[in-house]
Image (cartoon, rainbow, N blue to C red):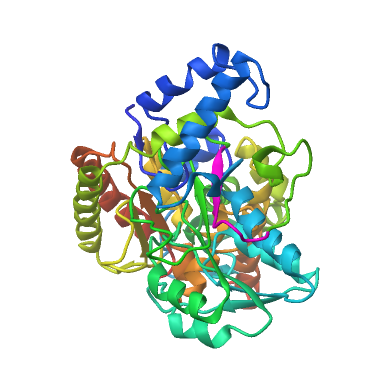
Amino acid sequence: MKQIYLDNAATTKVDEEVLKTMLPYFNERYGNASSQHLVGQEAKHGLEDSRRKIAKAIGAKQHEIIFTSGGTESNNFAIKGLFFANFPEKNHIIISKIEHDCVLNACKWLETQEAEITYLNVDEEGFVNPKDVEKAITDKTILVSIIHGNNEIGTIQDLEAIGKICKQRGVLFHTDACQSFTKVLIDVKKQNLDLVTLNAHKIHGPKGVGALYKREGIKITPLAHGGGHEKNLRSGTENILGIVGFAKAIGITKEKDVEKMIQLRNRLIEGILKIPNVKLNGSKEKRLCSNVNVSFNNIEGEAIGGYLENYGICTSTGSACSSHSLESSHVLKAIGLSPIQANSSLRISLSKYTTQEEIDYFLEKLLKIVEKLRRISPIK
Amino acid sequence: MIQTYSKELMKHFKNPKYVKKIKNPDGVGEVGNLNCGDIMHLEIKVEEDKIKDIGFQTFGCPAAVASSDVVCELVKGKTLEQAEKLKKDDIIQKLGGMPLIKIHCSVLGIDALKRAIGDYKEKGGK
């Protein structure tokens, strides 16, 4: 059976070009970038060339990029690193209720370390109101951290508006751009960004590598101490092969790919909304080109996913049943969905490789599945 | 999905045989809550102390749907006394195992059955 992968918000396949770029770094250019000899210097060259490319992609300077093991580490580093660099003079951090788990849980942990956290509400489409950010800032505020493109519902925040407020009020501004990178413009100057989390595996790069952009001059406390790599901010031998793959992946999703994805996404949304009693979660316009999230009244998300899998189609759900914690999605809750609506949700996420045939096949199967599951459901 | 289901479980999930409403049921049991994500509705027809017919409707994940179907399969034709002895392990065994995190789905099936039998008895039998 042919596999149709519509879970690209979870991870993406490594692009052939990316793989080709990485391969020599396994067994030819395998040096340690800290070594002075030729083999080490070859690796160092790969490292710095990649750093330059990644910096350029977001309008930053080369030395402002710190390589990490991925989005989770970058987000933890930004939040905990800034907290410990500013505590006890300041102890307040502002985030939204729809942040990724790694931001939420890093903040929850910081509450045990005397941090004050404000969890901002979002509206029903998932937008943070910049005025709420402004109201929440106090003289103890260190940082505002708001996710750029939401991983569940695809809502794209107005970073520029929030960044402007942060700049005016003299607080730092961080965004988790794992989902939006290469799909939506990120310009650290225009958007007044002080820190940005990036990662490779959502953009057809390898897993286990990411970066934190940190504007020069900002003090941060490292999480990993050791041999002084990454300007003493993140020790540990650099994952060169991952890093060169990451840098190569930046050019994989081009503007025309984004346009094609927007068309396919809209086709998908239109097709799904023809089914009765379906709700689109998130915004219609300011939405990632890759994301569709819908709730089907009275049927359970994991059951839909289970049937789709029978046709070789991979999706994901925000239902409680499918999570490790048996709790439904905090993001869907934050945009006002009832537990049953959250449990009835399905996320379909596209990539540049998604085709119209795949979308149409998905829609055809989905229609039948929804009908069948509604017959099985006791809720009418 | 974060877990792997057995072939048997997927069989009952894909083609449940007991999805139906019973005409004038003698006992009805509904359990679950929307916060946890599963709701199971079970109906029985009783004749001479035996479960003559049984049907279910479930809002839930593959494990919940398959558990409901297997409960019906295991107790159809059995006496009420036999049916009341059904344990979650019987369901799990019949389904060829179940991911740990889904065990509560099998418990839900047992609870729905017990409520349906309880409902029948409360009404004073026939």
Spot occupied by residue A20 in the image (x, y as percentages of width and height) = 41, 20
Picture residue at 47% right of the left edge, 68% below the top: A332
Picture residue at 36% right of the left edge, 67% below the top: A281
Which residue is nearer to you in this view: A188 or B4? A188
Spot occupied by residue B126 in the image (x, y as percentages of width and height) = 57, 72
Q: Is residue A85 visible?
A: yes
Question: Magenta includes A320?
Answer: no
Where A15 falls versus A11 (above or below)?
A: above
**Is A83 positioned to the left or the right of A250 in the image?**
right
Spot occupied by residue A90 in the image (x, y as percentages of width and height) = 72, 76
**Is A265 positioned to the left or the right of A165 in the image?**
left
Where A143 falls versus B49 (above or below)?
A: below
Q: Is residue B109 visible?
A: no
**Is A327 positioned to the left or the right of A176 in the image?**
right
Magenta extent: A209-219
Spot occupied by residue A227 in the image (x, y as percentages of width and height) = 77, 35
Which residue is nearer to you in this view: A359 or A297? A359
Where B88 falls versus A331 (above or below)?
A: above
Quarter of the image for residue B46 reads bottom right
